[in-house]
Amino acid sequence: MGDFIMKKFSSARYVDSSEMVDRIKVIKSAEELELVRRAAIMQDGAMKAAFAAIKPGMRDTEVAAVAVHYSQDHGSENGIYLCASTPLGIPAKFGQRHVQNRTIKKGDTLALLVEDSGPGSMYTELGRSCVLGKVPQQMKDELEFVKASRKLTLDMLKPGTPCKDIWEAFNDFMRKNGRPEEARLYCHGQGYDLVERPLIRNDEPWTIQKDMTSLCIRRMRTSAISTGCATTTSSRQRPGRPHHQFPEEIVEIDV
């Protein structure tokens, strides 16, 4: 569209105002932060409803549909609902609705990622895993590493911290623990858009500022998907604090 407009009105003067608009958008007012908090509360409820409904014989898409229904009943307008089930011991990969046709069986694990807007259209994000049975120790151990790696990032989400430094510190942590370095956008701003600046990458020139909302998502694929996901807001001196209240654990479903 931009290319068409510039060709259509070739005599006009064009100025790239992306930096200006981004900086206005990412600093959240008290009213905007309240909408972020309400979105997180909604997603807590969506995750709880989905895990309460899951049972052998359901398809992945039916579990995701429970989260969709709950979210829309509580003010959401759109979003993404990634879901994947798998037998224990077999790695899984999140998929959109067209690949969510697997039938869930007793003993399986399932991971759900709710990425939708809340009442007021602010975005947050919540990811959790469950097992239809007992959670094996390997998954518990892996989740603890996921939480530790995510905490390192959250602790650095303080005003004045360069995004590049967070990226480098995180990958240094991964190398020291014998894990692959991060190559994707694992932490980024969030609010009006599902993905907005600042981007925690080595090419982001920004530093963290007060009242930015950021998403930090950590996923490890070993025997299944271990997911730890939190939307936080940076305060004046303290690191980011998650808005979601859903327990940071792998839920055991009694079947």
Image: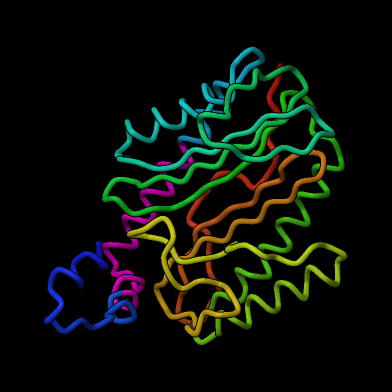
Location of residue 6 in the rendering, given as x and y in whole percent from the top left corner = 20, 72
Quarter of the image with the C terminus in it: top right
Instruction: Residue 56 in the image: state x and y as whole percent.
Output: 66, 15
**Point 14% across, 68% down: residue:** 8
Identify the image's colour scheme: rainbow, by chain, secondary structure or one colour.
Answer: rainbow
> What residue is rendered at 32% in x and 58% in y?
34
Which quarter of the picture shows residue 76?
top left
- Quarter of the image for residue 102 reads top right
Relative depth, front residue between 12 and 117: 12
Q: Going by the image, does 144 lie left or right of 215?
A: right
Q: Return the residue nearer the eye: 15 or 140.
A: 15
Q: Is residue 29 above or below residue 86?
A: below
Image height of 124 relative to 67, above or below:
below
Q: Which residues are magenta?
A: 22-45
Main secondary structure of the magenta stretch: helix
Residue 16 in the image: state x and y as whole percent.
28, 81
Which quadrant holds residue 128?
Answer: top right
For image coordinates 53% across by 25% down, the residue present is 61
**Residue 31 on the magenta span:** yes
Tell me if 213 is positioned left or right of 129 in this view.
left
